[in-house]
Image (spheres, coloured by chain):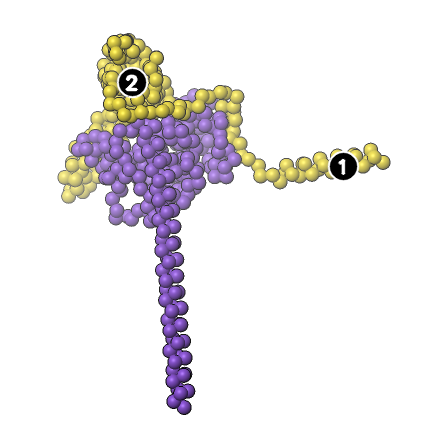
Amino acid sequence: MFKKTVLILMLLFAGALVFAADSDKETISVTESEQISQESEIAKEQSIQSKINDIGSKILNANKIQDRIVFLYDTRAEKSLLEIDSTVTRRQVVLYDDMYKFTQNDDEIAAMLARGIVTAQRSYMGPVNGYSSAVKIKAAPKKFEMVSDKIAVDYMVKAGFNPLGLITVIHKSCPQKRFDRFSNKNLTSKRLAVIYEYIYTKYPYFLANNTYIENEHYQNFLLTSQHNRKLLYEKIKTGSKEELDYE
Amino acid sequence: MNRLFLSCLIIMASILCFQMNCFAGEIIKDELVEETLKGKVFENPYKPYKYNYEDVYAIPIRLAVISNINSEREIQEGQDIVFVVQNNVYHHGHKIAKKGDRVYAKVGAILKSGMNGIPASIIFNDFKFEGLESGKITDSYEKFGQDRSLWVYPLKWLLTPLPPTGTLTNLIKGGHAKLKTRDVFEVYYHPNW
């Protein structure tokens, strides 16, 4: 009887040991997989960051921008409402994951960065080391939004990117509000029409040799911008110099 | 018999082709481009330029516009503007630009004056000097109007305790950007860039 009890106890002990060893292995394998996924996440972020750095520096160099501006890929969805815009304070162009996921090619990444570069560059101008410009940008965001779009087109062209990428990325990522009269942002359709007119006037090459014509998003832009393009068509036909009231 | 078979084959093939055309996703054409730009040849505005920013040597070139420009009057983005060189410019003893030479540039973006004293501005870019590489010249020059925001904002904050007087400062607009023939500005030529 005693022998049997000892044998059973030994078997139970051995079983417990095997179970403990197995659970240890499982813990190790879970930690390892977490580590691997973290490493792959870091590698992915590094690859996006280096891509953003390359494109950003290309735009800065090609446009001879003599102000220091840096770029950051942020995995957070978007900027917190309480956070101060680092584009005008630290001259750091932040590309949030929420925006990055809308980009499909280098033109579109360049478009996002070029807009940020314009704002950061303007925050260097004016009295108090550009502080007054930063206040103005924050006080009149609608006005500077349009100007940033236009100058971003210039920067993209100079750096060898297709400015139509700015149209497709804004078309995909910016929602359409009902009104913009009491808003601090312009209607997206109005912004797109102004960018289109700017490209038509200054860089017709890209429209005459349109590599985006079969792009689904560009096609959707053409479909949804018919009224505004008609207005532009009439302006061109009549030779008017009036600023158009796009919808 | 062969002829009948061949005719049937041709008819069926043509029906198939017609149907394929009907079901293929149609590409929306840009009528504006088709009607106004089609057939015209445009030069690619992108000039691959190999810069070398190691060198810091720059030669100033003084310019003035040929006729007065105002941001609020008939001026358009993309419009050509003519400037005149104001001094003889030398590099290693060679005259690279002489006084009175015409220089062409384009109007870049125009920022209209806004509320709270925000000034207008005009950006001039794409300066073209005869005989000088455009990649070696300052990219742009921006002319600002009178910046009234410098006193409008402090005034607004001072008047905030007396509503609605603070809000009334919104109505003060910034100055127009004016470039007069007597306004001389400098662009830089970097011969070793």
Q: Chain of mark 1?
A: B
Residue that lies at the very extreme toward the front in this rendered image:
A3
Give the answer, above or below, for where B119 lies relative to B190: below
Q: Position of residue B126 (x, y in %)?
A: 34, 21
Q: Position of residue A206 (x, y in %)?
A: 45, 28
Looking at the rendered image, the disc whose residue lies closer to the viewer, 2 or 1, is: 2
Determine the colour of chain B.
Answer: yellow
Residue B74 seen: no
Identify residue for label 1. B9
Q: Nearer the viewer, residue A156 or B141?
A: A156
Q: Residue at x 40, y 39 (%)?
A: A170
Q: Residue at x 16, y 36 (%)?
A: B155
Q: Disc 2 vs disc 1: Cβ atoms closer than 8 Å?
A: no
Instruction: Assign the N terminus of chain B to one quadrant of the image.
Output: top right
Residue B61 seen: yes
Identify residue for label 2. B191
Task: Give the residue type that dot 2 points to.
Answer: Pro
